[in-house]
Image (tube, coloured by chain):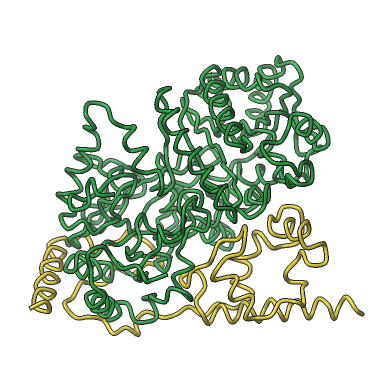
Amino acid sequence: MTKPLPPGISLEQFNSAISEMEKVVGKAFVFIDDVNELRSYRDPYNTTNDADFAPSAAVAPHNVEQIQKILAIVNQYKIPVWTISTGKNFAYGGPAPRKPGYIVLDLKLMNKILEVNEKHGYAIVEPGVSYYDLYNYLQEKGIKLWIDCAAPAWGGIVGNTSDHGAGYTPYGDHLLMQCGMQVVLADGTVVETGMDTTSNSKTGGLYKYGQGAGIDGLFTQSNFGVITRMGIWLMPEPPGYTPFMITLENEQDLETVTDLTLPLRLNQVIHNAPMTVDLLWEAAMSVSRREYYTGTGPMPESHRKKMAKDLHLGIWNYYAAVYGPEPMMKNNMELIQDTFGSIPGAKFHFDDTRKGDPGWDYRVKLMKGEPNMTEFSLLNWIGGGGHINFSPISAADGKDAMKQYKMIEKRAHEYGFDYIGEFLIGWRDQHHIFMLMFNRMSEEEKKRAHDLFAILVDDAAAMGYGEYRTHLSFMDQIANTYSWNNNSLWDAHHAIKDELDPNGVLSPGKMGIWPKNLRGKA
Amino acid sequence: MKKLLTIALSLLALTACDQQPEAKKVTESDANKPLPEVTTETPPATDNKLSQRSGKVIFELHCAGCHDPGDAYAATKQLALVRGKDLAVILQRTDLVPDYIKYVVRDGLLEMPPFRPTDINDAELDNLATYIVDSAKAYKAKESK
């Protein structure tokens, strides 16, 4: 493979830019060796080719001043940089850039926990801080605050929050819990949002809005600046915590359980985001597909039924928790048991009977913000690890959930893949995650997975659904589904992009937002 | 000409920053130093130090989540299924040599994604490989007693 270079840049210009960056961060923090260094910046789980997302280099600054200097260099040469924080955004592209030849701006080494305020319940962190890092810090210092982590907890606060990630405690809507950020704009200007921009502010981590336009959201799922610091609210450790699971016997129970959940969720009888998890996702925490089925195509019904029986799982498996003082939990649990007990065949499970089951144990950890990596067991389902997430939003409404599930299941089966999925009820919506697993050693299967994903985007759009987040390969296709009024939303994104980043150096193409020099050329 | 342009652009960027005194401020924190002032000097590259974490620290941070013994650990389960129980737990395997470990960490293997030099730098990768090999030797020595 010939070395990819930034678009429109000669090798001589590239070498010259690299040499200038080395002066800024030191040779040890600029990576240009394709074999020994840059292979680690690829997305191993893509549905096309590694070469489609191969960077030309990576540079790892240690502070804001170095970022400013790097941005001055890339503005001069008009070289695109692709910003990552912990780089663990797998299923959506990992650390890899949107196009070959970009230089990865790797913020992993900016990894300071700048402040933890136990009384008011927040932390201020740099982009390289992982969920494990923050959790370990709180544990070591004996600070009675919980984190809310992504399921694979090696990801980080800044990256996950700015990609609109979700978690499993009552603080699971990560962007809702974000408070204040520091951003470096393409021209090197440093901006702080919210209260932090007043002099001697003491409320930066407490109040999100300040005066004037709230612009924090502009820097999420976008490429308008480089986030270098973020405040995140942390939940005080509650006096009690009761996780529970309900196994449901019938496919159609998805409709009932969703409808019964909404009032409990909106009225905060259930404090966190309930998950309705399909049989295969749950089973994958304990077994691999080959232990039950070695044929091709989706696992047949008879094998699924046997597996459900062996593992004491439902066709759907519902997880949630209540938190607080004992009387409050008792009261809420009674309401919850009365409500869901009406579903025929629904069975409640608690720690006393379920402990030791890997599927139960990791949910119990997630719903109290204890980082773990158990969910990576999904990658064992067919082996080889290829996976990409199709993530449409649906209403927290039974009929809607069923409609979306049946649409995806039908297409998945038509293309020869298992439906492996879960629904997360946020507040009024559901994040529906379809985990499309494929054998990444088979070019034919990768292509089939890619084609399935593409048609799902179109099918979903035709039914009125949009995705909340996506893989590098599908950012443009999905951006085109957010097209009301002649793409006026994307025109607005592009107007901001052109104003803030006229040379188009920051993460071109992130979520389908392109600078003017590359627009329409992707 | 290019050099002049670089300097001019750098100065522009830096001037813009100098007009943002807030940028120098960080929130109240006991362990927190203010951000460095932006200067026109290029800092000596030695300011950025490579971390020197032990193999054990690296293992616990980056590997244990999937490779610890037990059913909750994805890689251990998969290795048990594909390679057999004796080869499931990497801290108990004497067939792994440092060069192989280092290659797999940087390149990934099947379900496992690669680790970047900013996750684990080259010296730390040496520490990690040594830690895995030594732990396995110690485990076998204890087993054979």
Q: Is residue B138 above or below residue A358?
A: below
Rendered residue at 18%/53% (across/down): A517
Front residue of A70/A269: it is A70
Q: Which chain is green?
A: A
Q: Is residue A130 above or below residue A72?
A: above
Q: Is residue B105 above or below residue A207?
A: below
Rendered residue at 26%/54% (across/down): A225
Front residue of A59/A132: it is A59
Residue lying furthest right: B145
Q: Where residue A119 appears, x then y in whole percent?
A: 46, 49
Quarter occupied by residue A252: top right
User: Relative to A226, is A133 on the left or the right?
Assistant: right
Residue lying furthest front: A444
Q: Where residue A431 appears, x then y in whole percent?
A: 50, 33
Front residue of A354/A33: it is A33
Q: Where residue A189 appears, x then y in whole percent?
A: 19, 60
Q: Is residue A86 above or below residue A69?
A: above
Rendered residue at 59%/76% (across/down): B102
Instruction: Count the marks.
Output: 0
Q: Where residue A368 appears, x then y in whole percent?
A: 61, 44
On-image quarter of the N terminus of chain A: bottom left
User: Relative to A165, is A308 on the left or the right?
Assistant: right
Front residue of A210/A68: it is A68
Q: Name the tint of chain B in the rendering.
A: yellow
